[in-house]
Amino acid sequence: MILLRTPERDERGATAVEYGLMVAMIAIVIIAGVTFFGLAVSDLFLIPAGVFKG
């Protein structure tokens, strides 16, 4: 009897690419969040700093 087997494929390269894309997307979200919220947080600290300065 001849058994038909599907050839096993090496998916390590595809997995590495997928992880790389996920890391890139997470980095983009973090950079966008820090840029957006960083300006707002900076303003929160500048207002009280002006009170103590004068």
Image (tube, rainbow, N blue to C red):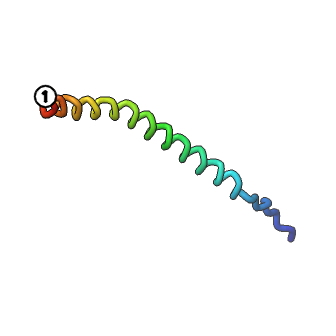
* Residue 27 vertical position relative to residue 35 in the rendered view, above or below: below
- Find residue 42 and report its image quarter: top left
Q: Residue 33 or 14: which is nearer the viewer?
A: 33
Residue 30: x %, y % from top left: 43, 40
- Residue occupying image coordinates x 45% and y 37%: 31
Callout 1, which amino acid?
A: Gly
> Depth check: 1 or 23 in front?
23
Name the residue furthest bottom. 1
Where does the C terminus fall, quadrant-wise?
Answer: top left
Task: Give the answer, above or below, for where 7 lies relative to 37.
Answer: below
> In the displayed image of the protein, which residue is found farthest to the right?
2
Side of 5 relative to 37 (left or right): right
Q: Position of residue 46 (x, y in %)?
A: 23, 31
Could you tell me residue 39's position as x and y percent? 33, 30
* Location of residue 3 in the rendering, given as x and y in whole percent from the top left corner: 82, 67
Seen at 50% across and 37% down, the residue is 28
Q: Nearer the viewer, residue 8 or 13?
A: 13
- Image quarter (top left, top right, bottom left or bottom right) of the N terminus: bottom right
Q: Which residue does the numbered mark 1 point to in the structure image?
A: 54
Which residue does the image show at 43% across and 33% down from the upper left? Answer: 32
Mark 1 neighbour density, 10 Å: few (under 14) some (14–19) many (20 or more)? few
- Judge left or right: residue 26 versus residue 1: left
Vertical arrangement, residue 21 with respect to residue 5, above or below? above
Q: Nearer the viewer, residue 6 or 22?
A: 22
Q: Quadrant of residue 8?
A: bottom right
Q: How many marks?
A: 1
Looking at the image, residue 2 sits to the left or right of residue 48; the answer is right
Q: Secondary structure at mark 1?
A: loop
